[in-house]
Amino acid sequence: MMNLMKKTIKKKYHVELKNNKIVLLDNVEDEKLKQKIENFKFLSQYADFKGLKNYKDGSITANENVPSYEAEYKLNNSDENVKKT
């Protein structure tokens, strides 16, 4: 019997965030993948958080020892922040 399952290969690439852009530190030979990484944006880079208190079923955590904040919400495709992607 032939195994039809595709084997997933994971590769990690080192990146930095400079001037609000992702900069690759490693060589990426696949041009399509390189563009995908370089053009990736985190929600926090473009989202409008004025209506954050209106989101439901979410959580916000903060670490007082370092400047670290995390918010987790379920958004649907009609949300304006999702449409911006």
Image (tube, grey):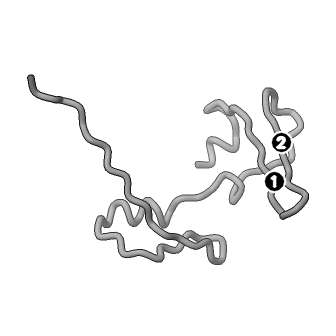
- Identify which residue, 85 or 8, lies in the foreground: 8
In percent of width and height, residue 14 lies at 49, 70
Label 2 sits on a secondary structure element that is: strand
- The N terminus: image quadrant: top left
Q: Amino acid at mark 2?
A: Ile
Quarter of image, res 36: bottom left
- Identify which residue, 25 or 65, lies in the foreground: 65
Q: Amino acid at mark 1?
A: Tyr
Q: Residues within 10 Å of mark 1 (few under 14, many from 20)?
A: few
Residue hosting label 1: 69
**Which residue is at a point 77% across and 49% down the rendered structure image?**
70
Residue hosting label 2: 60
- Identify which residue, 22 or 79, lies in the foreground: 22
**Which residue is at a point 64% across and 41% down the rendered structure image?**
82
**Which residue is at a point 41% across and 75% down the rendered structure image?**
26
Label placed on residue 27: none
Q: Residues within 10 Å of mark 2 (few under 14, many from 20)?
A: few
**42 to 24, vertically: above or below:** above
* N-terminal-most mark, 1 or 2: 2
Label 1 close to label 2 by CB (< 8 Å): yes
Label 1 sits on a secondary structure element that is: strand
